[in-house]
Structures are given as C-alpha cells and as structure tokens.
C-alpha cells in the first residue's frame, strides 16, 4: 500500500519533501549541455543530491511530453535512477472516458510503473475509476489547486452551499473505500487546506505551491498533515532544482541543490514534532 | 484560422466526420500483426480508406501514451500519413498550472503540430491560456461530456442557478476573443447540445458519442451545427475503425472501414441541407 510506505518514509527520513523533476531544457545549467542527454544528466545530479532528504520525486509529464519521443526517453531513463527508498508520482492530471482513462492508467501504473499519479475530476467517477482500480497505487484527485484560475470553477459555490472543490472532496471520500485515493491541495490556500484536513483526517494530500508559488511551509505542515504529522507530501520544484548562480561543475550544482533541499527539510523538521 | 479551414472542408466534403484514431493493439485485426508497427499499418489503412470522407482525425493520446516511446513513435508516424485535406485534433484533455500548461501546448501545437487539441477546464483560465495563445490553432474546452460521470460535477447546479458546464460555456464565450476556442459536448445529451448551440451560435463544437456510445446522428447534426450547418465536428471512433468480421487482407479491412465511414457520411448528408 502506498500510504503505509509513504508514512514509513516520512518517519524514517523525517521529511515530507517531494522534489518536482520539471526539467526545462532552456533552464538547465550549461554544465549539463555537454552530455548526450542533458535532461537525464540534470535529473541524475538532482536525484543523487537529494535522495536521502526526499521521500518522493514528481516528474510533471508535460516537461517530457513537450519534446516528444526524446522527452519520454529522458523520463524513462530518469525513472531508473530513482532509488527504491523514494516514491514516484506521475503528475499528469489525466482524465477521460472509461476505456481511454484505462489507457492512461496503464501508461502510468504499468508501462512506467509509477507509484502514484494525479488526475483531473471534471468528467466524474467513471473517468477516474480505471486509476482507482490499481489498489497498490495512489491516485491524487485535483481538489483545490494553487493557481489563480482556481477561482473560475473550483471555488464556485454550488446550489447546496458547498464549493465545487468541497463537492470533489466529498465524492473522493465516498469513493475511497480501498484507501488508495488522495487529493491535491495547493499550499497557497492554507485556510482551505486546514478545513479540508479537518473533513478528511486520514487522506493523503499532495501539496504543491511552496517555494516559487509562495505558499508558507509552516502553515502547510501545520494544516496539511494528519494527526501523526504524516499523510502529506510537500512538493518543491523550481526552488530546489534551479538554484541561483552559475556552475562550473556538476559537483558545484549538486552542492547548491543539496543545500536548498536540506534547508527545506530542516525547516520542515522545525514544524514536525521530532527532530532527527 | 482553424474555423475557416474547418468550414471550407465541411462544405467541400459535405461531411462533418472526424475519425477517432484510437488504435488499441489488442483490438487490431490480426492481418496487421505481421507488420513491424501494427498500429501504424492499421492507422495507415484507415486513413487511406477514409480521407476523402473525413474532415479530421482525432488520435486520443492515451492510446499511444499507454505504450510509452513505442506508442509515441506510432503517433508521429501516423501524423505524417494524414493528408493536408484533413485537420488533426490531439485528444489529450490536458490542463495544469501556467508554466506547465505551456509545455503541453508546446507538445501538441509545436512538437506534433496538431491543428487542435482538447483541454480540461477544472483549474480555470490561467491553466488554459497557454493553449489559447496559439491563435491559428483551435483549443476545445471540455464542457458537457458523453459519459455517465458528467452527473458528478459537470451537471451540478451552482448557487447562481446555472450548472457547472453552463458556467464553463459562459467563461469560454468571454475568453474567446480571437475565435480560437471551441467546446466538447457529448452526442448523448441532445437537449443540452441544443441549448448550448443556442447560447453559442458561432462556436465550434467537437461532438463525440455517436456510434458505440449511443448518441443519435440526426439529433447531433440538427442541434449541434451552426446556422449554416457547419462549425461542428462529429467524431466516430470504434464504430468505424473496428468493423465486425475477420479480415484475410488489408484490402478487405479497408473496404469494411470505407463502408462504415461512407454509411456514416451518407447518413450525415441526409440531415445536411445539400447533397453532393
């Protein structure tokens, strides 16, 4: 089960950190460009520099898909580099009619063998069911996202008084018989995160939005974790993988990445009950 | 502009048919399995047998993604086989925060150079804007889909009395300054299709759900087209690409596919004002 593995990792590493592997070739330091596959070399350096601190890695599929076959080759090679002591989350936000959604679920959970993935709820239960049927995997349903556009639909109030994202949460709680469904809630909305955690005390929450997007790490941990300060995954992408400065060697880049990750995890530990 | 090209094709071919290229290796007739790339050979046969009848082809990305790099190679080879007299629609239902959505838009509109694609609205405007910025392309926003799960969220009533899909339609109409945004409405909901067309007399509507999913072609054309009986794309997938029977040659398969496509287009022409 994903959730028990996750919480074991959170305990043993004393960390909630998930590193977003959103490798943009235009932003990768020049020191990697001499490699045949700059993206793979870049990801390899990041993984090596952070795998003791991170509980999970989350490649956003868009960053690979944008370069077609070459990008997917980079994704597959990257997945081989992630140690078993870290979980893998495919951030794809997929969702389609049943027979098609089954193909996406197969792509993420069989072909690439990710431990978890993200899905979009707009089309409803039957569009997500093929993902939920993989009981060992965890499927994160978008609930309340960190971007401004969340006001357009997610935060619209329904006739029954609830907001759309609250209706999504309710449905997810009803569907989650096997305990293999989680939700995505952005760190930029701490009040709503607190309310959601109260309504769903045991659910696994994937929380992007700290760092570049401005969410507070302290509030994220206080409001987002469960009663054991677990069952939450806090994503940091750009802030860790694109440290400032010019790097003349991969070693130097790795030290900067490791420092950023360590600073994030040390800050997390301040807000977690125990310190290693 | 996509819309003017579309309507020219509808006029010249007297057809609204878009063939869904959802090649499932498990369903491809055995006659294709001797080929190095059965999916490409299968798609090639379908395209050759239907390109004079169809105005567009819509590969659902899931069917290619499920097989990873091999699948994307098949997709790229398939795209090269589609003649310029047919439009290409990437059915991906993507949607993510801005910088990520930009990557998806780049994948579909630059890397693969599709003429159009589908996106999911849950995350709101900024998650779709990178797609809308490609003015020559058409981006179809999911509005009311053909599956049962549409009742879960799409058809939920909001506090202002409108249903969620109606709120999506309103936003799309407000965003559609450049005339390059369309919507997806399932053929299985003819009454709502008629209401939507009334509220959006000029928008391009992508309509899946006839054939295997049970939508009526007559109602789809009557309610889905604009005042010139244009600006609508009617998708048929499984019904055309998987004709019944065992095929001992590719020719035989192509004749069956051509018959299915021709029957669909002839039926369309009964409901369109002019017959060729």
Image (spheres, coloured by chain):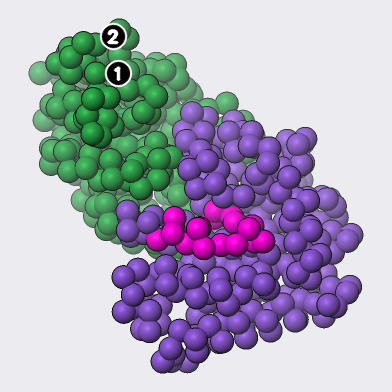
Chain colours: A green, B purple
Task: Say which quarter of the image contains residue B264.
Answer: bottom right
Residue A222: image quadrant is: top left
What number is the disc on residue A29?
A: 1
Q: Position of residue A209 (x, y in %)?
A: 42, 24
Q: Could you say which is closer to the camera, residue A118 or residue B110?
A: B110
Residue B114's x, y, as percent? 56, 50
Residue B102 lies left or right of residue A223; in this view the side is right
The residue located at (37%, 56%) in the rendering is B73
Residue neighbourhood size for the residue with mark 2, other residues' Cα within 10 Å, grouped as few (<14), some (14–19), many (≥20):
few
Q: Secondary structure at mark 2?
A: loop
Query: Which region shows up in magenta?
Result: B74-91
In front here: B193 or A176? B193
Note whether residue A183 is visible. no
For the N terminus of chain B, the image quarter is top right
Circle 1 packing at 10 Å, graded few (<14), some (14-19), many (20+), is some
Label 2 marks a residue whose chain is A
| Residue located 28% across and 9% down the image | A246
| Numbered label attached to residue A246 | 2
């Amino acid at each position: 089960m994903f959730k028990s593995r996750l919480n074991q990792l959170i305990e043993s590493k004393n960390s909630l950190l998930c590193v977003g592997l959103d490798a943009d070739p235009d932003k990768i330091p020049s020191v990697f460009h001499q490699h045949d596959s700059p993206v793979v070399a870049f990801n390899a350096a990041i993984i090596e520099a952070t795998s003791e601190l991170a509980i999970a890695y989350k490649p956003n599929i868009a960053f690979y898909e944008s370069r077609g076959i070459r990008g997917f080759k980079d994704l597959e090679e990257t997945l081989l580099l992630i140690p078993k002591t870290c979980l893998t989350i495919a951030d794809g936000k997929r969702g389609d009619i049943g027979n098609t959604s089954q193909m996406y679920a197969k792509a993420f959970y069989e072909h690439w063998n990710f431990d978890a993935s993200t899905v979009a709820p707009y089309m409803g239960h039957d569009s997500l069911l093929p993902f939920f049927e993989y009981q060992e995997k965890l499927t994160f349903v978008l609930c309340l996202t960190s971007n401004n556009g969340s006001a357009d639909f997610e935060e619209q109030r329904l006739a029954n008084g609830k907001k759309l994202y609250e209706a999504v949460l309710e449905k997810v709680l009803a569907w989650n018989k096997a305990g293999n469904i989680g939700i995505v809630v952005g760190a930029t909305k701490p009040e709503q995160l607190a309310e959601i955690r109260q309504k769903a005390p045991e659910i696994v929450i994937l929380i992007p939005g700290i760092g570049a997007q401005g969410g507070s790490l302290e509030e994220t941990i206080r409001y987002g974790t469960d009663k054991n300060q677990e069952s939450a995954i806090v994503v940091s992408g750009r802030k860790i993988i694109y440290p400032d400065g010019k790097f003349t060697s991969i070693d130097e880049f790795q030290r900067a990445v490791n420092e950023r990750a360590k600073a994030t995890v040390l800050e997390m530990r301040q807000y977690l009950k125990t310190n290693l």
